[in-house]
Image: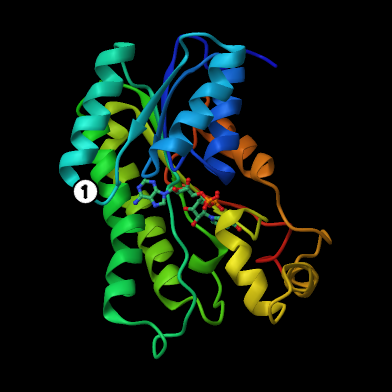
Amino acid sequence: MTGRFDGKVVLVTGAGSGIGQAAALRFADEGASVAVLDIRPELAALTTMMIEKEHEDHALALAADVADATEVDTAVDLAAHEFGRLDVVYNNAGIMELGSVAETDEQRWDRVLAVHAKGTYLVSRAAGEHMGEGGSIVNQGSVAALVGVAHLAAYSAAKGAIVALTRAMAADLAPRGIRVNAICPGTCHTPMTEPLFRTRGEGDVEAGVAATVPRYPLGRLGTAEDIAAVACFLASDEASFMTGAVVTSDGGMTAV
Ligand SMILES: NC(=O)c1ccc[n+]([C@@H]2O[C@H](COP(=O)([O-])OP(=O)(O)OC[C@H]3O[C@@H](n4cnc5c(N)ncnc54)[C@H](O)[C@@H]3O)[C@@H](O)[C@H]2O)c1
């Protein structure tokens, strides 16, 4: 593995599980010190332990709800203070609520929009205070922002907001040399998508996976590592002329 992030400090939200955990491990393997933020402290601690096993003093666990301004400001300040700088933010934290508009109550709608859209705004605002000139922000979108997916109304709206926000932030932050890009992953098998598979498979997760795979021309679902690799690329200097880009990593799902 090359050291694309040697000496850099990376903040990953939702880093206690799934894609965020895979990205945190990969950033660390490539030389970064990683601030591992998650709403569940025990999950943040787990990822931090996994990193520290290989890379001592390269991880810091942060417990915060990305939708809470005070918690976000405190956590981001702590990360910047502990590691002395902040170069990369991966706004990855997310939740999925299944349901059409008719099936989604107001409380769930508000929470999904808050975690994704407000969370991306709050973490980026706090991180921007510490990022100086240069750096990179990667926002987590979804194919649900690009094509219609049934029974995912609030989630799709939230991811659409993230894609639009990515372009607006790219325009605002370009003068500071901060690049802002979004990834739109296709379906990966993580704890977040278990309920989706269970619904599609009428109670049987494996049947739900089997029902989902045909939507993907490459004939498989994504892995957390597939998406983490794209996040690391976008965050790295190899993507130095990319900003405001919305990059799919979806096995061809949105191409057909
Ligand atoms: N898995 C997929 O198929 C898929 C596809 C497209 C996009 N995504 C997006 O990728 C991101 C990661 O998803 P995943 O599949 O790895 O899910 P996951 O459930 O495995 O991980 C999400 C993590 O975010 C944390 N989290 C949730 N709400 C939070 C909050 N308010 N503040 C801080 N942390 C919070 C959770 O505790 C969890 O550790 C999400 O934004 C998701 O919408 C996932």
Q: Name the spot of residue 137 as percent of width and height, x first.
A: 39, 36
32 or 18: nearer the viewer: 18
Colouring convention used in this rendered image of the protein: rainbow
Outermost residue, front direction? 42
73 or 205: nearer the viewer: 205
Q: Residue at x 58, y 27 (%)?
A: 25
Question: Looking at the rendering, in which quadrant would you find the N terminus?
Answer: top right
Question: Looking at the rendering, in which quadrant would you find the C terminus?
Answer: bottom right
Neighbor class of circle 1 (other Cα within 10 Å; few <14, some 14-19, many 20+) is: some
Q: Is residue 183 left or right of residue 199?
A: left
Disc 1 designates what residue?
68
* Quarter of the view holding residue 186: bottom right
Q: Residue at x 26, y 29 (%)?
A: 76
Q: Name the spot of residue 112 as percent of width and height, x first.
A: 35, 65
In this rendering, the count of numbered labels is: 1
Give amino acid for label 1: Asp
Tell me: residue 223, above or below residue 193.
above
* Quarter of the view holding residue 187: bottom right
Q: Name the spot of residue 207 as percent of width and height, x first.
A: 78, 73
Q: Name the spot of residue 11 as percent of width and height, x first.
A: 40, 29
State whether residue 244 appears in this view: yes
Outermost residue, left direction? 70
Outermost residue, bottom direction? 102
State whether residue 238 appears in this view: no
176 or 30: nearer the viewer: 30
Tell me: residue 64, above or below residue 78.
below
Q: Is residue 175 left or right of residue 2?
A: left
Tell me: residue 110, above or below residue 232.
below
Q: Residue at x 50, y 17 (%)?
A: 32
Q: Residue at x 44, y 15 (%)?
A: 8
Secondary element at tag 1: loop
Mark 1 CB within 8 Å of ligand 1: yes
